[in-house]
Structure formats: structure tokens, C-alpha cells
Amino acid sequence: MSDKKPKNVFREGPISSDFIGNSIYKHQSKTSIGAHNIFLGQVRADDIDGKTVSAIEYTAYEDMANQKFHEIRESAFDKFDLTCMHIYHSLGSVKAGEICLFVFVSSPRRKVVFEALEYIVEAIKADVPVFGKEIFEDETHQWKVNS
Amino acid sequence: MSDKKPKNVFREGPISSDFIGNSIYKHQSKTSIGAHNIFLGQVRADDIDGKTVSAIEYTAYEDMANQKFHEIRESAFDKFDLTCMHIYHSLGSVKAGEICLFVFVSSPRRKVVFEALEYIVEAIKADVPVFGKEIFEDETHQWKVNS
Amino acid sequence: MHIRIKYLGQIVEVTGKEEETLEVAGGQVSDLLDVLNSKYNQLKNKDFQIAQNQELVSLETELTGFEIALLPPFAGG
Amino acid sequence: MHIRIKYLGQIVEVTGKEEETLEVAGGQVSDLLDVLNSKYNQLKNKDFQIAQNQELVSLETELTGFEIALLPPFAGG
């Protein structure tokens, strides 16, 4: 859809609240923006058959994943009147309570950001080859599947 | 809908990116949360008949506004499976590029946060008696009306 | 009946004050509005809703006292 | 034809490796899958999609070489 080279969406380890705050700060010079919408995926300490998830270890088929993120990005810019869009996803270990996905969209108008953000997050969940190993406190694991 | 006392949603001046980052950080101890969704309203430097908006001065009918925010909050908790919800709105002067509204919802599951956030933001725009005076660079003004 | 009247947003530009207290005989919200319209002749050109004791009311609502507010179009967020 | 095969996520637990290169005669994706199923007998119990050169393909797709990846269910976000 575009000959621009895909960016690398992946970050090693969790995405910090400082990084998110700073990303918001950097948008304050863009004075055509009226509405931001941010989605954050956080690792849940799910209880599964009496064992508690302590972390998720993320891996990805990286080149294809970055290509898919790129296609999602281009498609969202085509569909919605967005001023900017940023996507970051963790690789490696992310502990329960930490953030593994950060999607940030901005537009002059609010209706646009609601539609765009949900579209992007659902596409990421469905189309991007990222894999998650849920590590329990006793160091056993199971593989996460998106619902 | 509840006999809990309304909180004061208002903050004097803009809402800083540090405040938002810190608010995200504080949710990392809530490990039942899987999804956060954040809406930020930012003052646009709109161009109106050749004049540019440099700031909005917000006033409110404060007691009624806090009561309305409280009703919106209670109604959202009734409708949606939310773990937490926070709303902050500026009073006084907020310059173009600065943030005047911060709405933050969290839930175990993502579908819930998308629906809840849009519901809350639309209710705030429609039901809360907040008034905005758009100040132009030449110090003339006009009154903002939500669309 | 004492009624405290609050003027918000651009209504303040018409009344020149943020609040005042009026003594009225009672009746409906429309009766109070008649008083205000004759006091502030630019008021009839303004778009506003009326709240009584912090709930929106119609012109036919009975005045119950305490607090009336004139609320121009909302602009939150 | 040289084909580089990448194993992702839980598929690595079946193959014991993240990638390898195989020499195949060509044919369809299903022909390659037959080879893999006989080499890794737990593979048939696993749920996965197949990508060729980073695009999802069906079993009937012709092998074109370069890179095949076995992708278990996605879990991003």
C-alpha cells in the first residue's frame, strides 16, 4: 500500500509509563490535534487451574510482524483522518502489571480516534504473528491465544 | 444512583503529561487489568476567520458539573465491567497544544474499555455544564460550543 | 421566595455579574425568566438552558427556590 | 529447492529448533508439510498457519522457495 519501509514496532521488555508520558508530551507541539486516544495492553496475573501468571514472554516472526504493523498503519491512515499514529509492542519478558502494547492515535476530532483505535487494536490481535508464553509462578507455562 | 459523595474532577490549568504518565504507573499494581483506554482532549489552535485560537479559558457550574461527572461515573460502572475509571477536566486557561480532559478506563478485557470510554466522553460533552472561551492571539474571543 | 441566580459562560457578558439574589412571588420558571428578560434586554438573544437546584428544568417547572442557573451551550473536553 | 523453515512459539517445543533449511523437490505447501509431519511426529497435534515469504498461504499454494514459517495462534497485545 506504500513503498515506505516498515518501522520496527518492537521494544525489548515492558513499555514504561515514562515512555508513554513522554510520547504524549511530544504531541503538545501539534496544535491541529483535538483528541488523542491511547490503548494499553497490560499483562494480567490470570489464575488458571490454581496457578497464577507471573509474566508473559513474547516472541514474534519479526519481519512479517513489522510488515503487518505497517499494513495496519497504512490502512488506518487511508480509512481515518488521523494526524498521527504510533504502535509499540514488547518482546521478551513482561511481568504481570506491566505494559506490552501501546497504541496511540491523534486527530483533530474525537469520533475519528475512537473508530481508528479499535480498528487498529483488533487488527493487531488478529493479523500480527506475535506469540506469548504465559509463565506461572512455579515456572511452568502455557501458550496464550487471543480471543 | 449512589450515595457516595461526588469527587472534584476539576484541576486548575492544563493536565500535564507527567500527571498522565504517573496515573498509568499507579495502575501497574492492579494485575487483574488487561486493557486500559485513555482519551485526551487537547486544545486546538483553530483558525477562525483568519484569527488563531491561542488558549481556551474554562469555567464550570462546578457543583452541578461534579454531580454530573459522578452520575456518568456511576452509570458507566453499572453498564460496563470496569476495574477503574478516572476523569479530570481543566478549569482556567489551557493553551493550544495543552490537555484539558483526561479520561482513563481499565478492565480485564479490551472490548469493554472501548465501549466504556466512548460512552463516558460523549456523556461528558453532552451533559456536563462546562464553558469554554476561545481566546484569539489578538485577545478577542468567542465562545466554544460542543458539536 | 429568595432565589439565588447564577450566570455562567457568555451569559455573564449580558448580565455583567456572575450571581445575584432576587425576591420573587413564586410561580413557574418562565415567570422568573420574564423578570430577567426585562432586567437584561440582551438575554433573549442568547441560547441557554435553565437548571433549578442543579437539575435541568423546563419553563413550566414550578419555582421551588434556592438556586437557578442560566447555562449556555456546554463546551467541556 | 532450498527452503528455510522457521518455527515460532509453541512449534519450537515440537521441533526443538527455531529454524532449519531443507532441500525439497518443489510441489505444494502440503508436500513440504508431509515431510515435516514425518520428521516431527507431534506436529500434527498442533494448531498453526503457514506463511510463505511472510504471507499466509494455503496447503495448495505452490512452493516458491526462500522462507516458510509455521505460525501457531497469535497472541499479540
Image: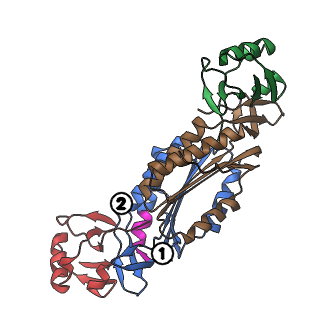
Chain colours: A blue, B brown, C green, D red
The disc at residue A91 is: 1
Residue C67 point in image, percent of width and height: 72, 30
Q: Vertically, is D77 above or below B63?
A: below
Q: Secondary structure at mark 2?
A: helix
Name the residue carrying label 2: A126
Q: Residue at x 40, y 87 (%)?
A: A139
Quarter location, residue B72: top right
Is A66 contained in the magenta span?
Answer: yes
Q: Vertically, is C48 above or below B59?
A: above
Residue D32 point in image, percent of width and height: 19, 76
Q: Nearer the viewer, residue C38 or A41?
A: C38
Residue A92 point in image, percent of width and height: 47, 78
Give, as a three-letter code, the residue at label 2.
Ala
Q: Vertically, is B85 above or below C18?
A: below
Q: Nearer the viewer, residue A83 or D62?
A: A83
Residue A9 at least partly seen: no
Give, as a three-letter code, the residue at label 1.
Leu
Residue C51 at least partly seen: yes
**Is disc 2 in contact with disc 1, using a CB cutoff of under 8 Å?**
no
The disc at residue A131 is: none
Extent of the magenta region: A57-67
